Image (cartoon, grey):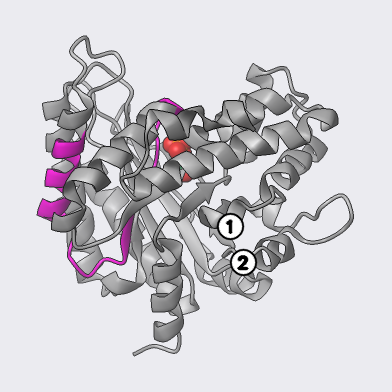
Amino acid sequence: MSTYTQELRATAKALVAKGKGILAIDESNGTCNKRFAQLSIPTTEENRRAYRELLLTTPKLSTYISGPILFDETIRQTTRNGKSFVQVITEADMIPGIKVDTGAKDLAARPGEKVTEGLDGLRDRIAEYYGMGARFAKWRGVITIGNGIPSQACIDVNAQALARYAALCQEGGLVPIVEPEVLIDGDHTLEQCYQVTDRTLHTVFGQLHDQGIAFDQMILKPSMVVAGKDCPQQPSVDEVAEATINCLRKNVPASVAGVAFLSGGQSAERSATHLNVMNARYAEICPWPVTFSYARAIQQPALEHWRGESQRVTEAQQRLLHRAKCNSAARLGEYSSEVERELALV
Ligand code: 13P
């Protein structure tokens, strides 16, 4: 048992506690600026700070959110009044997390494919983040479906990096969130997505096993098994839920502490509906809690309402809390159109 075993187990369990999920607000500056620019919000450091303050200071957020994932810039920032965001999070009874990869870059000799970087110096960065109060981390590998891709080489290098990252995290006291995202971009079918997700999860768990990862001290953040967004034949909610659960049950060891999905470009309501059906229909046959770790599917309505204007903060926070509540209900299999409509009553 390592120094951190008990702490890692407790953190992992708390992150996927009943009725709770994870809030991803770890967009890199580039991604955050892109989302701001789409809404004509000036792409300044101060606006990124103000937006993260809005999100993190939302009253009652911890009723539904176990922990937010931050970006490096954000973990070093403070509220307008000078309180560090890490302190804001811990005082609200949530757990601070940190994205530690440095982004998906073009994979040499494999056109159209990516490999995620960030292993160099990672042991030292983990020690720094732990010292700042972070207790879990995230690394995202990206798998693209297209003509002749993904190659096994792309899946292998991403799986190997995910496992190296996870081992360093557990050594340094951070619960690793292992995120192999099969992208929704393209016109592939549900069946093709199933095959690629199956191959990816199989390879990732092979690497995690070979590199000595303690499964009860990690969380898997997968994409759902869906058809590509340009596929003319879109599956039903039930088909997505069934394919996703089948694929996970086939590949994810029972001792994994939890499964927390990304939303991956699905709409806010669709992400909640899929999660809800998975929990309502399949919770009894899943050995791990199944919850959310969404970014866009929780944040987008709040961001669209805020638009960089300070007088809209309170209403934007209500929208964030509403989406957090909807997904919390979905994590329990209790989401419905009534829960969805509640915001109108606020
Ligand atoms: P989305 O839910 O917007 O896909 O983001 C989740 C995430 O953290 C991607 O790395």
Q: Quadrant of the C terminus?
A: top right
**Residue at 36% over, 51% down:** 291
Which secondary structure, mark 2?
loop
Count of marks overlaid on the render: 2
Q: What residue sits 21% from the left and 17% below the top? A: 234
The magenta-colored residue range is: 241-268
Any magenta on residue 194?
no
The CA span between labels 2 and 1 is: 6 Å
Say which residue label 1 marks. Answer: 62
Q: Residue at x 34, y 50 (%)?
A: 332
Q: Amino acid at mark 2?
A: Asp
In this rendering, position of residue 294 left or right of residue 207: right
Locate ligand 1 by image quadrant.
top left
Q: Position of residue 106 (x, y in %)?
A: 40, 35
Q: Residue at x 14, y 38 (%)?
A: 242
Q: Position of residue 92 (x, y in %)?
A: 67, 63
**Is residue 300 something that shows in the picture?**
yes
- Residue 138 horizontal/vertical position (percent): 46, 56
Mark 2 highlights which residue? 93
Task: Return the disc, 2 or 1, that comes first in the chain's sequence.
Answer: 1
Report if residue 253 lies within the magenta region. Answer: yes
Percent position of residue 256, x then y: 26, 66
- In depth, the one of 88 and 219 nearer the eye is 88
Which image quadrant: the N terminus? bottom left
Contact? badges 2 and 1 (CB < 8 Å): yes
Instruction: Indicate whether 188 appears above or below 159.
Output: above
